[in-house]
Image: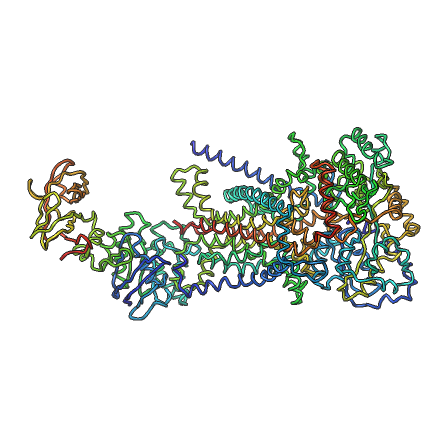
Amino acid sequence: MASISLRGVEKRFGAVEVIPSLDLDIEDHEFVVFVGPSGCGKSTLLRIIAGLEPVSAGELRFAGERANEKSPAQRNVAMVFQDYALYPHMTVYQNMAFGLEMRRMTRAEIDERVRRAARMLEIEPMLGRHPRALSGGQRQRVAMGRAMVRDPSVFLFDEPLSNLDAQLRGQVRTEIKALSQRLRTTMIFVTHDQVEAMTMADRIVVLQRGVIQQVGTPEEVYEQPANRFVAGFIGAPAMNFLPVTQEHGAVRLGNGTALRVDHTRSGPAILGVRPEHFVAAPPGQGLAAELLLVEPLGSDTLVHFMAGEVRCIARVRPETRPQPGQVLHFTVQPDRAHLFDTESGAAMR
Amino acid sequence: MSTSLSSRQRGVLALLSVPAVGFTVLMVAFPVAYTLWLSFRATPLGHASHFIGTANYARLLHSADFWNSIRVSLLLYVLSLAMELVCGTALALLLFRMQRMPAILRSILISPFMVPPVVVGMMFLIILDPTIGVANWVLGWFGIAPSAWLASPMGVIPTIALIDTWQWTPFVALIVLGGLQSLPPSVYEAARIDGAPPHRVFWRITLPLLRPTLVTALILRSVDLLRFFDIIYVTTQGGPLNASNTLNIFTFHIGFELFQFGYASALAVTLTALVFGVVLALNQLRRAVAW
Amino acid sequence: MERDQKSAAARVLIAVLAIIAAALILTPLVWMVLSSFKSSDQVTAYPPSLLFRPTLANYENLARTTSFLAYARNSLIESGGATLLGLLLGIPAAYAASVTRASWPALATLSARMAPGTLFLVPWYLAFRDFNLIGSYTALILTQGVIALPIVIWVLLPVFDAIPRSVLEAAQVDGCGVLRSLWRIGLPLARPGIVIATILSFVFSWNFFLFALVLSDHSTKPLVVAAFNFIGEGSTDWGGLMAAATLITLPPLVLAIAVQRWLVAGLTLGAVKG
Amino acid sequence: MPSRLRLTLAAAGILAMPFTAHAAAFNWQQYKGQTIHVLADNNPVGHMIETNRAAFEKKTGIKVEVDMFTEQQMRQRLVTVEDARSDPVDVFMTLPSREGLQFAKAGWYADLTPLTKDVAPDYDFAGLSPALIAAGTIDGHLTNIPVNIEGPALYYRRDVFQKCGVAVPKTLGDLPAVAQKLRACEPAMTPFVSRGLRDALAYTYSVFFHNMGGQYVVNGKSGLCSSAGLAALSLYGNMMKEYGPPGSVNYTFYQISALYRAGRAAMAFESTNELSNMMQGGARLHDTGITLLPPGPGGSHPTVIDWGLAISTYSKHKGAAWLLIQYLSSPAVQAANQLAGIAAPRADIASQPAVKQWLAGAPVRQEWQNTLAEMAKTGTSEVGYPIAQNPLSRQYFGDAVDKVILGAATPQAACAAADTKLNALIAGHAE
């Protein structure tokens, strides 16, 4: 129902520039996740889209129409806040009905919508309660319900899962994803958790210091990170970064070890290897790694070792039952290795 | 947070303050300007006043009575304020803890400030009379020697501070109670689960969270205490020997007993400036403790 | 087990503290009320007469010689009007000051309480005379409103501050403008604070006599000014004064009792913070 | 005001009827329909106005509204209104001994001289105390009409004096010795009490000062520290310090009357106005004697002052206002006042039958009346310095007295400090 486009959007708080200048297009029905470390401007960006935060410069368009001056209500957005921001003095029903009331909807229609949403979210029995009588998860649902009943053109989520325990978080994540597929509304979701981003997003927008680092599908940002920041931020455990010198078809580590990788040029670079892209090699070949720490995860095992000055993590098959102190040898999958410019951090292709 | 408002919202919010500020300015500007004007003039009673420059201010700066009144005002201010804040917070906690106390009892516990201050003064004049007062009579049961209370130059300020504390502790308590009731109970619960003993919860959690409310109490009491008047006016009129002659009492004497309106205006302006300065400083505190 | 003992001990301690506090607070009040049932010579008798034959003479005298009800009505109109005025102007101002974090409006309204009350007497008298308002309820409500307004604002500031911003933003997203958020969200959430502000500003203007002293006339004189009728050379009527004081104290007390139920704790914000 | 007193007053109102009946020639109704506002001090005189209001309204068709306040409040309201040259006050009570010169200089008093020519035949203007009329005439203008006389008198306990075998002191110098004996014989009792509150004590201190032979202004200089002045200061200070109640430095009529009424003081030097207050409850009615303060080296100069009724310069109802003043100061009303303990500033009142009967009701009343008569004859209304800044002069020497009472300074030092300020004040250097 609404595509959103940002052109040259800037945001300053006094002298502090939070968002320098930003362009972004979000398609109708798209589920977009803004991700980045805290303080990267992702929440500010969301609040700009919501209309809670005026822009310092630039233009904001909803469905092609300039929206800078529009209030949140006029933009027809709904938002789920990090702390849910339920109205404490209203019952669940009243909380959900409030926004509709503001739109002068008839009682009957309000009732119908509230009940429908409550049914969908399985919070019907709680309609008469006040927020203080609800558990965290229930409050979260009410917050979603409050957003849903409005039938908004854009759904905004500001880290809505951060107050939930891990198990519940996974469950709600799935629910939101399912909801988005059912409602087919544009959704923007802000999180600092890259797992949430990866699992839910149609497209991920990675932000750092107010600047978009990369926009792409989860696969794209994972497999083809645009720069060292994205590469390091997406994926857990994080990508390993090793300073190397490029030679033809190989890179040489500081200690002289040479590793074969594709796409090399010449000169210094940063080699980026995800833990799962280390490949066990026969003794004497590749990188000799004396294990410092072994973390069995069940499905696979993480091993920590030093490669020169850099601490690395590799993912190995659990059957190998590595032990600390043991020396393993690794090479990297040549086609999965990433090379980044030492200065700019940009991916070298 | 303030920068997050749109210009339209800012406009509406600014409009919300306009009636209050406008009303105050309308009411206060003329009297203050008038007093300021008068403070530079000599005002022979019943005759036209004339400009005398800063002579009234020079006079107060050279007046021992003025400096004495500043000292007395500040002493009384600090003493009363400290007692009222401590007792008021304690009373508020008590009321807060005893939620099920009947409304009537709660109301009576906060009622001293509902008694007109002049009556309070008259009442304590008799209760604290060294010879026929109940206070010494009761203290006598416990073998405590009679005290001169309001009649001792040394004791008068503490005594007045005590009376004022009796009257205004409930006021502070009520404000603090309001603050306590808007604190999230989950914080206490969290702290209790963390195993903090009650007094630690108070010092580490409750009190810091109460700071904005305490600053409100502080400011509201400060403006009144620095202008201390009623009880002294009724009981000692500034005596004995000027020992309770606060700046406001002194100003009143000059103005409405001696009818020296020019000089009294200079004193009133000075007192206003003093209160204003203290309030500005306390307001910085308000900003500093906002959470 | 140990925990139970501990909390029992704490409860006893609190009860003891409560009793001491109550005794300290109540003693002078009891003295006042008892004195109102004594004759003047009994009030100042020594040793104090604890056992005495109570007399209603002071109250009868009050009813007979003073237009007590008329003064009470004046006080109600003036303090009630001033409180309403204070709430009407003060609530929006406090809300705005809290949301914008700009404190100068709050400071500005406090200015009337920074100056000694006597500073206002002559200028106000001159001004109200020019508007032909001396002795009018209007003049008294306006001047007492100056007293009530800053109390409302300053009591409500921290209360509004305690409302999470996100709740107000949620209302904004739901389609509320500033005014409607104030009305639908701010007001209900600040209710305990508003109750307290109401009590405080009512009591303040109820007991403030200085402005009424020169601005009221015969027909608009409030109770507290009338109370001075009991004090004077050769005529200090201690019993009458205490009876008047008791009666003057009653209306604010009744108000406080009446609004207590709106003061219930933990009403609201706990649910949304943290 | 005790209800008994009010009843007496009402009865007196009826008594007063015959006096006014044959005054038909004078047109009391000439200002019918007007309303006048009276600003009154809350003391027996003020109450007297209130009591007589209804009868006056009926007689004249003038509506009277009385606003009564404590003295300081009254002055606060008055000065606000007068300073604004405003007219909500037509008639106000005034203390000529304190503020007469000051208010006259400010031009707040309307001149009553022409009005006194137009009176009812039975008014007897000449019967009003000539001394008070003279004192109230400033620069040829009659500023007020006296409606009472009063002064500090020595209330003492006959029974205690008898028990302790002491007599009323013959001279001021005997006072400490008498107090000493009373202390020895009745240790639980305060031997002597008088005013100690700085701004109130001029009234009582002036009698000590004058009786010692002091004069406030001698040849344009302050006489506070003359040898007579120092003697007065020492005596007053020491009496209060040694024989007064603890805390006497704050004492004014509130505490003094309460203390005496409660039977806790053997002697109280306080206003004659306090009679009904001191007698309230009846405990003191039959064991109290009243007399003047004993004479000193300078003779006997009791303080005698009056409350007067004045018309505001800015009043728009001067005619009606004068009718009220005339009525309240008429022989008939003043005779009635006397029965309520308000001493009339008319010498011949005491000879009226109703007054005689009242005086015979209790010995203390007759003594009170005698004391007042003596005051009227020999008294002076010089309470503090006879200058426009009289109120400030009272503060200055009040300070000195308090220092002595508290032992904070020797009489010499306390006096010297006050004298410097007083001389400056007399010279007009201070505003």
Q: Between residues B68 and C194, which one lies in front from this camera angle?
A: B68
Q: Would you say residue D91 is visible in this rendering?
A: yes
Q: Between residues D192 and C249, which one lies in front from this camera angle?
A: D192
Residue D334, horizontal then vertical, whole percent: 86, 54
Residue D384, horizontal then vertical, whole percent: 78, 47
The vertical placement of C169 against D371, above or below, is below
Horizontal placement of B85 versus A239: left or right? right
Q: Residue at x 65, y 33 (%)?
A: B139
How many circles with numbers are drawn on the protein? 0
Query: The N terminus of chain C lies in which quarter of the figure?
Result: top left
Q: Would you say residue B115 is visible in this rendering?
A: no
Q: Quadrant of residue B23?
A: bottom right
Residue D423, horizontal then vertical, whole percent: 74, 47
Horizontal placement of C215 versus C98: left or right? right
Horizontal placement of C151 versus C221: left or right? left
Q: Between residues A276 and B286, which one lies in front from this camera angle?
A: B286
Q: Between residues D369 and D409, which one lies in front from this camera angle?
A: D409
Q: Residue at x 33, y 51 (%)?
A: A137
Coloration of the structure image: rainbow
Residue A21, horizontal then vertical, whole percent: 29, 62
Q: Quadrant of residue B35?
A: bottom right
- Report the residue that reaches farthest toward the bottom: A65
